[in-house]
Image: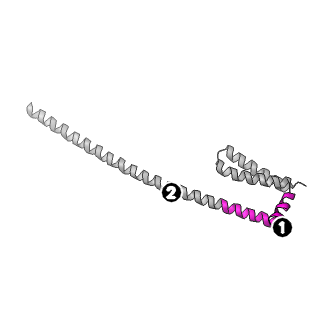
């Protein structure tokens, strides 16, 4: 007997992930996990007796315990992965901020050097005019 609720949930998951992928709002590396979850839910919707078989094969008392254990494991794995990604992103952001600060400092120094050169060029052109005035 097919479980319509699980079938509907699996279709919603697969459909949502597909739409997010097409809109480029979800990266492929994350979509693979969610597509696997959606397909697993679809399979359990089509073959609900597989859940009973997995429950006894893995030593659980009732199928709900297996589902909750798998859900908690999945959530822990996703949380760990996102924490790892966040740490990498923070490190990149810190490095980029440092590089931007160094570039800003170099730009400020170059602007000061240019201003100093212009000031020196202005002084030399006025002193050249005074020399020409003295000669005339």
- Earlier in the chain: of badge 2 and badge 1, it is 1
For residue 62, which numbered disc appears in the image?
Answer: 1
Q: Nearer the viewer, residue 12 or 122?
A: 12
Report the Cα–Cα distance between label 2 and label 1.
44 Å
The extreme front residue here reads 57
Can residue 42 be seen here? The reply is yes
Q: Position of residue 130 (x, y in %)?
A: 13, 37
Question: Residue, x 61% and y 58% (percent of image)?
Answer: 82
Left or right, 121 with respect to 1, comes to left
For residue 19, which numbered disc appears in the image?
Answer: none
Magenta region: 48-77
Instruction: Give neighbour class at mark 2: few <14, some 14-19, many 20+ (Cα, 10 Å).
Output: few
Q: Nearer the viewer, residue 102 or 126?
A: 102
Residue topped by disc 2: 91
Q: Position of residue 67 (x, y in %)?
A: 78, 63
In this view, 52 is above or below 127: below
Left or right, 28 with respect to 70, comes to left
Q: Secondary structure at mark 2?
A: helix
In this view, 114 is above or below 57: above
Q: Secondary structure at mark 1?
A: loop
Q: Main secondary structure of the magenta part?
A: helix
Please say whether residue 59 is one of the residues in the magenta stretch.
Answer: yes
Question: Residue, x 71% and y 63% (percent of image)?
Answer: 73
């Amino acid at each position: 007997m097919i479980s319509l609720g699980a079938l509907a949930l699996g279709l919603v998951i697969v459909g949502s992930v597909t739409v997010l992928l097409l809109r480029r709002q979800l990266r492929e590396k994350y979509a693979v996990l969610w597509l696997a979850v959606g397909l697993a839910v679809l399979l359990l919707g089509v073959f609900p007796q597989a859940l009973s078989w997995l429950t006894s094969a893995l030593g659980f008392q009732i199928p709900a315990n297996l589902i909750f254990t798998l859900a908690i494991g999945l959530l822990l794995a996703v949380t760990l992965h996102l924490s790892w990604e966040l740490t990498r992103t923070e490190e990149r952001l810190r490095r980029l901020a440092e590089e931007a600060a160094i570039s800003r400092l170099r730009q400020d120094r170059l602007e000061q050097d240019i201003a100093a050169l212009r000031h020196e060029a202005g002084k030399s052109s006025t002193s050249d005019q005074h020399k020409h005035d003295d000669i005339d």
